[in-house]
Amino acid sequence: MHNAMEPLVRLMRAARRRGAGVGRTLAAVCLFSCAAAIGHAADRQPAALGDSPVTSDYDREKRWAEEILPTIVVGEPVYLQQSNGHRFLGLYTVAQQARAAVLIVHGRGWNPDWGLNGVLRVALADAGYTTLSIQMPVLDAGGKLEAYLHLFDEANERLALATAYLEAHGYRTVAIVSHSLGARMSNEFLTGHPPETIKAWVSIGIINGLQNTQWVKVPMLDIFGEKDWNGVLNGAPERERLIRAIPGSLQIVVPGADHFFEGRENALVTQVREFLDKHLTP
């Protein structure tokens, strides 16, 4: 299962080079299934791809921002502008005497302050790491996992813009801490031409496995819950094998934790902080 996405990604890239319609390309292949591993109600609603273009739901991003911004106590909102003119939200939290910066990347359909992301962005700032938690591209609430493949290019742009923002604020040592589909998007970003300022990657509960790890040049922490989704658990042995080739990398299972680390957030933060301390500070 963990390699099921790779043929589809290759096919989509080839289709883009030929100018073929993405919808028709998707219809011609057998899409991977991760539904059994995904237990959240918002992730189980149906959506049809058909031949219609799949694009980010900017209205949903706006609704997320309107919902969370009045509740933000720690950090400040910033907006970064994409090449198409769209401005996406980031929550920027400056640590006192910051040792480095951390870019936080949420999972499918969520927002920069949702659940685990909100915990990480505040806790890591308290631990001495300036954090920038960004809004990643989202579909409507019924968007299927495979449809998010259409958003990977936009996700790459957002990650590059967020890294550039941190660089512009003086940070030359940056880590990515990413969860679920956000980890898969980060994987794609790191196998391209990531900025040299990226020095470490934390992948939390990555879905659909690791891809093209021969191009990942920074230490990686593959961390997940003992009670994680089946797709995450089943792919763990292969991920562990792959990261052996990446110096400084390791795999950790958090006892008793589910995919969202509900009630086990502190245990996760401890492991993430220790990994960052080892790889980001002198």
Image (cartoon, rainbow, N blue to C red):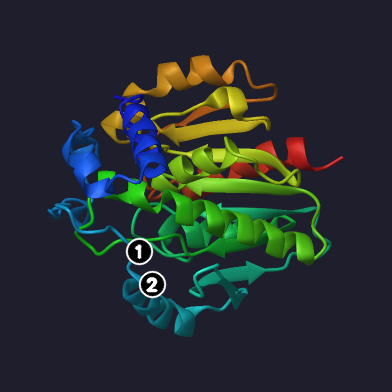
* In the rendered image, the vertical position of residue 251 relative to residue 93, given as above or below: above
Tag 1–tag 2 contact (CB < 8 Å)? yes
Q: Position of residue 246 (x, y in %)?
A: 64, 22
Q: Position of residue 124 (x, y in %)?
A: 64, 55
Q: Which residue is mark 2?
A: 61
Which residue occupies the extreme right position in the image? 282
In what quadrant of the picture does the N terminus appear?
A: top left
Q: Position of residue 272 (x, y in %)?
A: 60, 42
Three-letter code, disc 2: Glu
Q: Secondary structure at mark 2?
A: helix
Name the foreground residue: 84 vs 155: 84
Q: Tell me where residue 12 sits by quadrant.
A: top left
Name the foreground residue: 43 vs 23: 23
Three-letter code, disc 1: Ser
**Mark 1 and mark 2: span between their CA atoms?**
9 Å
Name the foreground residue: 47 vs 274: 47
Which residue occupies the extreme front position in the image? 18
Q: Residues within 10 Å of mark 1 (few under 14, many from 20)?
A: some
Can residue 271 be seen in the rendering of this structure? no
Q: Which residue is mark 1?
A: 56
Callout in the foreground (1, 2) = 1
User: Is 53 left or right of 113, judged from the image as shown?
Assistant: left
Q: Going 37% across and 40% down the picture, which residue do you hit? A: 18
* In the rendered image, the vertical position of residue 73 relative to residue 277, given as above or below: below
Q: Going 43% across and 49% down the picture, which residue do you hit? A: 152
- Tell me which numbered mark, 1 or 2, is placed earlier along the sequence: 1
Residue 169's mark? none
